[in-house]
Image: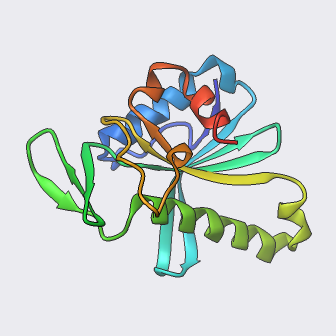
Amino acid sequence: MARMIPAQYEQSTTSAAEKRIFHLLENDPDTTDWFVLHSLGLTNRRSGPYGEIDFVVLVPSGAVVCLEVKGGRVSCQSGCWRTTDRFGAAKDFKRSPFLQAREGMFALLNAIEGKFGKASSHSLCLFAYAVVFPDVDPPPQTPEFELWEAIGRDDLRYPISKSILRRL
């Protein structure tokens, strides 16, 4: 069971998909020594003055994995990403979820290097990212991402720790 920080998600968290992933991480018996930061705020992002990483997973073997969660019926057509919720309401994403995850990971890496120096991050642990699609299979691969960067609903039939460790 991972140590969740904060211990509970904020009441203002509206994403059912994020809540589900929170509980999967929290209750996975193989994450006993893991720390998981939920909704980590970031400053100084390329895309604006503020950003957020849905989950930052600290794996004791020396890995930091940034997860972006996209719930609903997510699809990509002609490079445009969209989700449709359980009520049939569609919403277009401003950016690719893979770009969001990648930018979040590099923003975190840059913040750590800014605070502790470059040698503190590259030599001590692996940084990775993935996009979690808890309600659908990952979309077909495009030039913007590799299949290993996506965790789909079928992957979540097994402990989430297995899906995360497979990406390292």
The residue under the point 86% across, 70% down is 116
Q: Position of residue 53 (x, y in %)?
A: 52, 58
Q: Quadrant of the N terminus?
A: top right
Which of 97 and 26 lies nearest the eye of the viewer?
Answer: 97
Count of numbered circles in the view = 0
Is 19 positioned to the left or the right of 63 in the image? left
Foreground residue among 109 and 42:
109
The relative height of residue 83 versus residue 28 in the rendered view (above or below) is: below
Residue 22 vs residue 62: left or right? Answer: left
* Residue 133 appears left or right of 60: left
Instruction: Find residue 162 and report its horizontal and vertical position in percent.
Output: 62, 27
In the visual, does 146 lie left or right of 90?
Answer: right
Q: Tell me where residue 2 appears, x and y as whole percent.
A: 64, 30
* Front in this rendered view, residue 139 or 98: 139
| Residue in the picture at 46% in, 63% down | 144
Residue 51 picture location, percent across and down:
48, 69
Outermost residue toward the left?
A: 88
User: What color scheme is it?
Assistant: rainbow
- Report the residue at 25% width, 42% height from top: 72
User: Residue at image x 49%, y 57%?
Assistant: 145
Could you tell me which quadrant the C terminus lies in?
top right
Q: Where 105 sits versus 161, above or below?
A: below
